[in-house]
Amino acid sequence: MDQVKIGRFIAERRKAANLTQMQLAEKLNITDRAVSKWETGKSMPDSSIMPELCDILNISLNDLFNGEVIVMENYKEKSEKLIIEMAKQKEESDKKLLTLEILIGLFSSIIFLGAVLAASFIEMPVWLRVCLFTAGLILFIVGLGYALKIEQTAGYYECAECGHRYVPTFKSVLWAQHIGRTRKLKCPKCGKKSWNKKVLTKK
């Protein structure tokens, strides 16, 4: 999606409706600064207010996402193009998240290892050793929890039996046997338990 194009489109439709940024903001119960950010392409409207915004500007959601009024003969083509573009953006976002997962896991492990080594080899009172080890362990557990949450939600798991791609629950990912990002999970479609590999695309 082209945020700058969408921003210009919102500004055009607002002016066509004879509304100032302040008046549009009041109708949506937001600040005029938020409207200004949309129109300059710095941010997008929140999904919760998009339907109301479209009603006020007399456009469809598809028009909004495309940054132009879509005529009926181009509707299908534009819709398909938008869906493909959004899928690509999600895939890119998931790739970045999965890279972040690795970094969080490494960083948490290094902190924990550093705390253990410091507590083991540096001369200090026993209570300080315990505190250092505990702090390192807590940071390690929290870091791995965040990393696992990213792995659960970014992309999909593909069932080895039926090929169905899905997002499992955090609990099932947490307790599943795994080799890297391949986990032994029960498929919600076929009900069989198999080694499901992590993939980025839905199909």
Image (tube, rainbow, N blue to C red):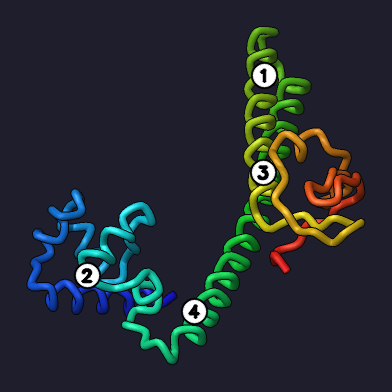
> Residue 67: percent from the left, percent from the top?
34, 79
* Mark closest to the chain's N terminus, 2 or 4: 2
Q: Which amino acid does label 2 sit on?
A: Leu
Q: Is mark 2 on a helix, strand or loop?
A: helix
Residue 134's label in the rendered image is: 1
Q: In which quarter of the image is the C terminus?
A: bottom right
Mark 2–mark 1 distance (CA, rounded to whole Å)? 56 Å
Q: State the image coordinates of residue 98 (x, y, percent, origin top left).
A: 67, 56
CB under 8 Å between discs 3 and 2: no
Of mark 3 and mark 2, the one earlier in the sequence is 2
Looking at the rendered structure, the number of numbered marks drawn on it comes to 4
Separation of residues labelled 2 and 4 (CA atoms): 20 Å
Marks 1 and 4, how far apart in space?
A: 53 Å
188 or 180, nearer to the observer:
188
Q: In this view, does 65 lie to the left or right of 101?
A: left
Task: Estimate the x, y position of residue 198 in percent, counting from the top left.
Answer: 78, 57
Marks 1 and 4 in Cβ contact (< 8 Å): no
Q: Which of the labelled discs sits on residue 79, or is there none?
A: 4
Distance, label 3 to label 2, CA atoms, is: 41 Å
Q: Residues within 10 Å of mark 4 (few under 14, many from 20)?
A: some
In the image, 73 versus 123, the foreground residue is 73
Residue at image position (70%, 8%) is 126
Q: Mark 2 points at which residue?
A: 57
- Establish if 196 lies above or below 140: below
Q: Residue at x 19, y 49 (%)?
A: 29
